[in-house]
Amino acid sequence: MLNQLLRSEWMKIKRKGLWFLAVLGPLGVVGLTMVNYAVRKDYLLSLSDDDWQIYLDSILSLTPLALVLGIVIVTSMMASIENETNAWKQWLALPVRRPTVYLSKYLIASCLLFVSSVILAVGTTLYGMSLGLGEQIPWIKILQNSFYPWLSSQALIAFHLWIAVANNNQGITVSIGVVGVIMTFMSFFLPDWFMWKWPSLANDWENPFINTVLGISVGLLLFIAGMWHFSKKDVS
Amino acid sequence: MSIIVQTEQLTKTFQKQHAVDHMDMTIREGEIYGFLGPNGAGKTTTIRMLLGLMKPTSGTVKVFGKQLSKHKLDILRQVGSLVENPSYYPHLTAYENLNIVREIVGVSQKRISEVLETVRLTEAAHRKVKGYSLGMKQRLGIAAALLHQPKLLVLDEPTNGLDPSGIIEIRELIKSLPKQYGMTVLISSHLLSEIDQIATAVGVVSRGKLIYQDQMSNLRKLARSTIRIQCSDLSQATIALKQLELAAAHEGEQLILENCSNRSVADAVSLLVHQGHDIYRVEENKQSLEQIFLSMTDGVSL
């Protein structure tokens, strides 16, 4: 049944501009970094001997914002597809299991953001190589830089999807989303246990792997809670 | 005829208010069951519980003889529904909308063109639903409900927002379904005339309670008529008619005959004329279905 639901969900997001968004996000991040290097390349190269590290850090300073913004927009649009004409009552009166319906929405949202991460990895590598930051390309670091934020933000995807599906009112969904984006923006000042800090990969142990473990495990808990709520809820 | 839908003491409470109050509804195979009641009487809430969209506060729903709470997927595979205003994906075409549903119910692509033909949307099939008129959206909703040839079709106010010709068209379509495909149809409406023209059985709901449930023909029998005669010297006339054993009573200025066969009316009139009464008017007074419902629902108009 999951296969059928996923195929349906892909059809539903056609012409919604979600693919455009998935491409725009990572290109925006690389684009802003290009501007940064165009303006003050000499200064940035003088900061350290490890030019790749400085380059990857400047990418990573932008990624969480783009990612959280993307999560807010994607989840709210995934839910609005049904909320708009209250299509839940049609969709859930079909022979489908509600937990599977919820899972299909989550997988699509997460998958779109994964595609963004792939584009980010490719963009990071290509522009980095064109800058001539050194012969030794740090492949592992590039992959970590591109995919760890995505893994760490699974909790945020689960959280914002729950909010979006539970509220027919898109105003509430977007308001909470805006608060989330602001928190991401200020993540430097937030404690390590704060979900919105995790995509920045920063923590006191200086080990980004911890963030991915936190993101995935808390994400799983929030996903189960959201799914449970969705399955019990009366559809009006 | 086997029973398709059976609810037992079905109840739904919202903040201590009974939206649906201990309802025992029975729908038999091949019926077009008209679910009639004023707005806000609990029709839509009942229908949502029949489709598993809401959980009953108490009571049970059985569809095709199976408990809905335990066999929801099996049951929903054979149920088509259109609840309240139509739901659709406005940024997609009618064909794409139906294709999404088709993916879930697993029928062939050919069915899409068939149902589009049935609701006469073939020409608009590849236009975005956003630009459809309300009537077209409603027809698309019906097409989606028919897609998998369900055994039970649940239509909540399907003629809402349709123009007169659209209403007639949909009515003819619904009427043909039990014969052509062996479907059983549950149709709700707040319009008596709508149910009167379409239904073979009827359930009347008021304030969450099912206050009447029977075959439509039995309901029509309740609509009996009387003959009212207005003439000079009422008391004399009443006595005269009593001799003819025509039960006559007088109410205000009028005599009322309960028996209104042609013979007895003719006898009564000729008797009165022969006795020299002036007859001002003779009229038939039929208690309409409308009035019967009005009295059933304590004056809440339909």
Image (cartoon, rainbow, N blue to C red):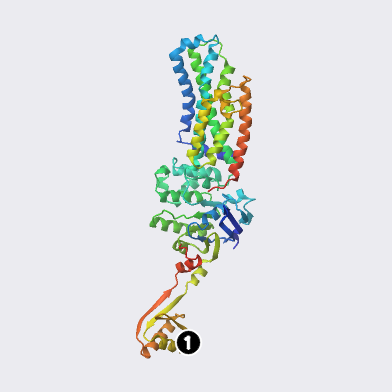
Query: What number of labels is visible?
Result: 1
Residue B149 in view here:
no
* Residue B48 spot, x, y in % from top left: 55, 52
Q: How crowded is mark 1: few (under 14 residues within 10 Å), some or many (20 or more)?
A: few
Q: Is residue B232 above or below residue B182?
A: below
Nearer to me, A1 or B106 = A1
Residue lying farthest to the bottom in this orientation:
B275
Circle 1 sits on which residue? B245
Going 55% across and 8% down the picture, which residue do you hit? A49
* Residue A171 spot, x, y in % from top left: 47, 39
Q: Is residue A221 above or below residue B260?
A: above
| Residue B284 relative to residue A78: left or right | left
Going 48% across and 87% down the picture, which residue do you hit? B245
* Residue B203 spot, x, y in % from top left: 53, 63
Nearer to me, B102 or B139 = B139
| Residue B99 relative to residue B269: left or right | right
Residue A160 in view here:
yes
Location of the N terminus of chain B (image quadrant): bottom right
* Residue A166 spot, x, y in % from top left: 54, 41
Which amino acid lies under the numbered mark 1 shown in the image of this protein?
Glu
Secondary structure category for the residue under label 1: loop
Chain ID, mark 1: B
